[in-house]
Every structure is written in C-alpha cells, then in structure tokens.
Image: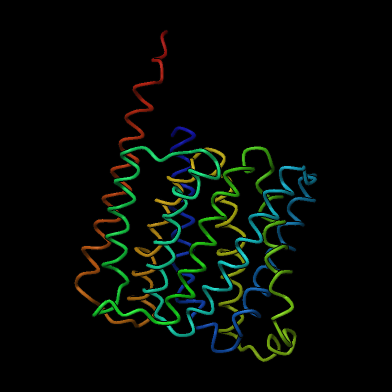
Amino acid sequence: MSGTGRAVLAMVVATLLWGATFVVIRDSLDGLSPAALVTARFGAAALALALIALARGRRPSRAAWLGGVAGGLAAAGGYFFQAIGLTSTSAGSSAFLTSTGTLFAALFAWPLLGQRPGGRLALGLVVAMAGSALLGVREGWRVSAGDLWTLLGAWCFALQIVALARWAKRGDAVVIAGIQAAVAALCILPAAGDLPGLLARLDGAGWARLAYLTAMGSVVAPLLQVWAQRTLPPGRIGLLFALEPVFALAFALGLGGERFVARWWVGAGLILFSVAGVEWSEARRNAATTPSSTA
C-alpha cells in the first residue's frame, strides 16, 4: 500500500473510532457537564501522549508547538460546542452537522493556505454534503439550538484541519497531538466546575465511557489524523471526515437505540460514493504520474 493509501486508511479508522463517540458522549453527559467531560478526556489524553513522547525521546519543535496550540484552540471549541449540542440533539444529527462543518475545511484552506479544491474534490464535497443532509436533518428541516451549537463546533473542527495541514508535516505527530490535547483541556478547565467531585460520582459504566473517549477518541484517533495530514491535503481530510456520520449511524442504531429512518440508507450511500469516487480518482491519477519501475 502506498503512503497515500495508508493515510486514507488511517483516516477511515479514525472516523470509525470517532463515529462511536457520539453515542458515548451523549450517554456520558448524564453524569458530567460538557466542560467537565472535555477537560477530563483531554487532560488524561495529554498525560498519556506526554509519556509516549518522553519514552520515544521526542521534544517539541517550533512546528509542533505552533500546530499543537493552533489545533488545540480549535479542538477546544469543537469538542466543547459539540458536547453542548448533544445535550439537546440526537447522536445522528450531531454526526451529520459535524461532518457538514468539516467539509468546509477545503473552503477554509483556500484563503488560509492557498489550496484551491479541484473539480473532482469539489463535486465529492457537494455529494457528501447532500448525503449528510439526508442522514441528519430532521423532518420539516427544523433546526434546534443544539444543532446550532454543534454546527459552530464543526466549523472549529474545520479550522483545526487547516491548522494541522499547516504544521503536521514539520512536527512529530505524538508531540503535536499531545500539545493539542493539553491546550484543549486547559482552555475548558475554568468552566469544568467541581471536576474531582463529578468524577468521584461516576459509576463503572461512566468510567468505561470516559476511558473509551480518552483512549480511542482523544489519543488514537487524533494521532491517526495528524499522521494522515502529513500526506493528505485538508480538502480530502474534510471529505474523509464525512464517513463519521455513517459510522455514527451504525452505532446509534445498534447501541444507541435511536429511531431508524429509511432515507439514512440513501445518505450513507451518497457519502460512501463521494469518498470512494474521489479516492479512486486520486489513486488513478497517482498511478498515471508515477514512473513504472524497470528491472
């Protein structure tokens, strides 16, 4: 598998792990406030990533500091607003709105990084947005306050993608992810309230959910994203993020007890079609431009 193929696979795995977090976050908010949840998961993640970086003998470079701080500020807003939104919207709607917002990464990268999306990618983004709409929009196209909070968080995630695109290639992935997690936790800490008291009241299921959010959603998945962004441009990263609601839908139906709607199949199909179409096109173009090896 080529380096680009491995990067795409890394993002697919990351979106699978993040897809499960929508149901987990929704259920975790019964025992923790949005600020306490974000602070706890990213504080623990920052500690774990720091230990990994120390064991590997990695020290923060200037690029790692810049990428980690910029990404952490954007992530703090993204996860905090997402958690607030999940107090009054469904996991499926939250996943749709989050993926819709991250699709804007390609548009943000145009003025901020000078990277204009090509025609195939632009078409893929439009198709993915249509699929996301079928997955998450309520009957009658109603929009709640929770939806607006979630969309605001999604735009923060789009800016995070652009920030990582700027510095991920020049900094160590573990260090960047660690700084990002620490900044996110510190930004939300003042609003976390009595965090030790809230954690002390968690039951076994609550600790299990927090452990998943920390290990998979705040350590492994962000590491995969930072690593993938060393190869893939922000527009393709934003498109691959559209897989999140497809995975979230599966978890919401299987584990979250949310109501099934037939049009979700069409929405999921459009997203999968758009991602597969863009990646197949990119693979063909790379194959055509790579010289064949000779014996």
Seen from this angle, which residue lies furthest top?
A: 295
Q: In which quarter of the image is the N terminus?
A: top left
The outermost residue toward the front is 111
Q: Which corner quadrant of the image does residue 247 belong to?
A: bottom left
Image x and y of residue 37, in percent? 62, 78
Quarter the C terminus occupies: top left
Vertical placement of 137 versus 204: above or below? above
The percent coordinates of residue 81 (x first, y second) are 54, 73
> Which residue is located at x 51 percent, y 73 percent?
82
Picture quadrant where residue 277 is located: top left
Tell me if 207 is positioned left or right of 239 in this view.
Answer: right
43 vs 246, left or right, is right
User: Between residues 115 and 67, which one lies in front from this camera angle?
Assistant: 115
The mark total stands at 0
Say above or below: 71 vs 212.
above
Residue at the location (45% across, 80% down)?
146
206 versus 242 height, above or below:
below
Residue 292 position in % (x across, y down): 38, 15
Vertical placement of 36 versus 181: above or below?
below
Residue placed most toward the observer, 139 or 244: 139
Q: Which residue is drawn at 45% across and 85% down?
A: 88
Q: Which colour scheme is used?
A: rainbow
The residue that appears at 69% across and 85% down in the rendered structure is 199
Residue 10 screen position, x and y as percent: 49, 48
